[in-house]
Image (spheres, rainbow, N blue to C red):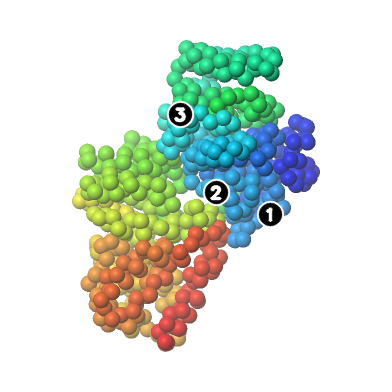
Amino acid sequence: MILESIKTPSDIKKLSYEELRTLAKETRKRIVEVVSKTGGHVAPSLGAVDFTIAILKVFDPDQDRIVWDVGHQSYAWKILTGRNDRFDTLRTLGGISGFTNRDESPYDAFSTGHSSTSVSAALGIACARDIKGERGHSIAVIGDGALTGGMSFEALNHTGHIQPNKFIVILNDNAMSISKNVGGLQKYMARMLASKEYNTLKKQIWDVSHSLPSSIRRRFIYGAQKLEESMMNILVPNIIFEDLGLKYVGPIDGHNIEQVTAIMKRVKNYMVGPVLIHLVTQKGKGYVPAEQNASLFHGVGAFDPSSGKTQCSGKESWSEFFGNCLTRLATKDKSIVAITAAMASGTGLSPFEANLPNRFFDVGIAEQHAVTLAAGMATKGLKPFVAIYSTFFQRALDQIIHDVAMPRLPVVFCIDRAGLVGEDGATHHGAFDISFLSYIPNLQIFAPSTAPQFEQILAYAASYKDGPIAIRYPRGTAVCDDPADYVFQVGKARLIADKGSIALITAGDCLPMVQDIHHRLAEQGVDAILVDLVSLKPLDEDLLNSLAGSCSYIFTFESNSIIGGIGSRIAQLLSEQEVKVHNYGYPDRFITHGKTELLNDLIDFTPPALAQDIIQRINK
């Protein structure tokens, strides 16, 4: 096998084009083989195999810096830059990351995990290179889905302004982000694909430049580029990248290794100023199940590599429960609208989109816009529900504060994937949402521990008109074990066990773990009051003050950073009481990737460890 002979990136430069095509097939087979066991982002990486090989054929990653946007397209990059022997450990505890990571390899120029950052990072690298007088190209690889994020346009605008040399943006246009791409940019890309006049003109200019002596070639290229820009504005108006100040090359078949390599060589050796290379690829290329269902195989768990069939528990997830419940509410209440950021299926909103398309808004990878769009809708009497993963809500904090909470607009933030999410790791854990939301005035925060609670909270949120609401819920299967007589009330906790000299207080997905701790303590003769907060803001202050008067210890548990979380708020509330308050949560560090249960073991956030720690504390 050719793949087994690739020990360093430089080995690829020695291969013929026929050998490179064989290498691409072997690399795809390796990706499917491993990801079928570990889960991961199989479709994006399969689509990027061919041009990854072309990049390594033309550029030198020891000197040229390649920045991958999000990093979920980078599996071939990992395999071909010295990590093939470790690729079986992908997304496992102690193994390699599912995204690019500077701590993992010197060939990973930038640590990634969130979208639309590559152009900014690569431009920063180019500026630093020039200031330090170093050599090499700086290259950003970005998917067109990531271009829907405003940060990428900010970076492109700055690039056009400062005009760095040896700076390349590679646009991987697969017409997909996670769900199918939406919006004006996607339509623009489609028009570019149909523009024969533009590509004929481009080829002619290239051909002329190669016929000139090297002594005058550079000056001619600069003049030809200016002429080309003027001609293109006549033949193909409003070419956005050219208008921003980048030289545009494309569109090019991103799976034609020989053609992509030839274009990259021309850009590397002859073009002046920043250049954007537009590659057209197929998400899931080379693996039929992923080609047929690219959204499913964007990020997938373990699957059967021969058939592509994924494993399914058959039970409703929290996301699915949310989407189905909101669809039912919206069928009765025509003021309800749903907004997401390129995550219709991931957030469970596919039924809403199918049944109520006129009230469903997928804004692309643009969380800031999603929040302020919702604020605008709310001013006109609509009831927006904004569903975004916890880790991505971080990107819209200013909009939550300034555009929603300050004017007390009734927007509902549905925070999916709260807590540890497992194999996607530090960039994707929902470990900070309680901390960054708790200090915001006018905002109510709830954390259902069961599906029936969640349904009651959603119904309340749909009717509430005096300000914003945030509801956090985890990844995984929804829990359905509420007592039939439970009734949700704002600012009221659920008292599950009411006898004991100590109290265990939790909310949301931590409840099953704390119930286990409660049982373990009872086996050792320690009775404990057990409280499910449900309402994180406002807190049930009456109950908490009562517990402070009757208990010697209060222990809090949360799937959030221990700094700034619900436990620290309770400790502050009870600071003048004699009761001892001890908080359990995520430590003050970024938690790595791996199965969630192993990560909890790693940070001692398990029933045996916590029960033992409680026993030791109360015995002192």
Q: Amino acid at mark 3?
A: His
* Residue contact at pointers 2 and 1, CB within 8 angstroms: no
Residue behind mark 2: 111
Residue behind mark 3: 161
Residue depth check, mark 2 versus mark 1: number of the one nearer the observer: 2
On screen, residue 439 versus residue 35, left or right, reads left
Q: Is residue 34 above or below residue 132?
A: below
Front residue (pair 532, 57): 57
Task: Pinpoint residue 358: horizontal percent, then vertical percent.
Answer: 33, 35
Toward which corner of the image does residue 122 lie, by quadrant? top right
The residue that appears at 25% across and 42% down in the rendered structure is 378
Q: Secondary structure at mark 1?
A: helix
Residue behind mark 1: 86
The residue that appears at 46% across and 79% down in the rendered structure is 613
Front residue (pair 504, 401): 401
Disc on the earlier residue, 1 or 3: 1
What distance separates the C-alpha of mark 3 from that of mark 2?
26 Å
Please give the label number shown on residue 74.
Answer: none
Task: Pinpoint residue 138: horizontal percent, then vertical percent.
Answer: 58, 36
Front residue (pair 385, 367): 367
